[in-house]
Amino acid sequence: GKALSQAIRAAGYDVWGIDIASAQDKQVVGVNLLDLNEVIEVAKKIPQCPVLIHTAALAHGQKPPIGENVITNNVRITDNVLEAFGKRTTHIIFLSSVAVYGEDNRNNPVVVSDTLRPSTDYGKSKLICEEHVLGSDIKNCTILRLAPVYDQKHMLDIRKRVFLPGLPSIKMIIKPSPQYSLTSIDTLVKSVTSILSLKPDKQNIYNISDSETYSQRDLTTWFPGKEISLPVILTK
């Protein structure tokens, strides 16, 4: 979210943000997105915007508040955002995930038309949120299903493909080496700014990733540590 905000602002757009905590930036307003009344009140303080970019969700094993789980947390946030901003914007860009496809028995790159069968609570939450976004009052909806996103400061999705679970200094060298699709922050920024430059057109869904794939062996070179070879069957 912060990377997108900075890039979009640098491109000349007026950007407002809502976050769990306000920042020094006067155009970032603190709000608990799980509290509908708070979100509605915040919406009144923000100028009416033609585009809403929805990035908020729990991910990467983050613990939800007491009384919530990943699915209810992410869906409630989305429903509250849609309720508060649905009539105040004409275009929503929702950051979803390729997790909506699920990984079981998938041996080829996914395409948008593939069957959706998420296997994780995170993937299930994103699919429900997609359905709510597409069924909302917002006329134009763009869904971006992102391959794992990373930059130099956010490498968790990369590390879990490199290091043995619970052993952050032991790198797996998987043989034969799997290939991964990933999304750099730069690719995400270019995708969103490109969409902003176009006239919105009803409902669109895109899979987003870097143009090249990455071998697991290549990813191991991004980190220091000792190496251990593993046959791919042991990583299933």
Image: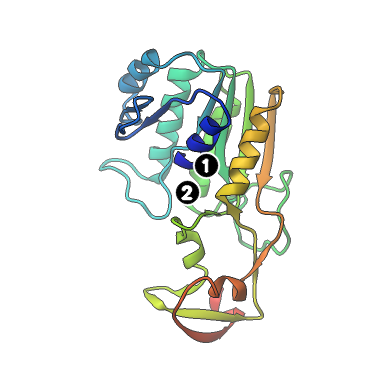
Q: Is residue 104 above or below residue 196?
A: below
Q: Tell me which residue sits at (67%, 45%) in the image.
A: 207
216 or 126, nearer to the observer: 216
Three-letter code for the amino acid on which mark 1 is drawn: Lys
**Hey, which quadrant is residue 28 in on the image?**
top left
- Identify the residue at horizontal 48%, vertical 13% (top origin): 48
Q: In x, y percent, where is residue 75?
A: 44, 35
* Discs 1, 2 touching: Cβ within 8 Å: yes
Residue 19 image offset from top left, x and y in percent = 36, 33
Answer above or below: position of 27 versus 2: above
Identify the residue position indicated by label 1 in the image. 126
Q: Quick one: SS at disc 2?
A: helix
Residue under numbered circle 2: 122
54 on left or right of 178: left
Q: How dense is the environment of label 1, judged by Cα within 10 Å: few (below 14), some, or many (20 and up)? A: many
- Numbered mark located on residue 26 in the image: none
Q: Label 1, label 2: how many angstroms apart (C-alpha)?
A: 6 Å
Q: What crowding class fits label 2: few (fewer than 14 Cα within 10 Å), some (14-19), or many (20 or more)?
A: many
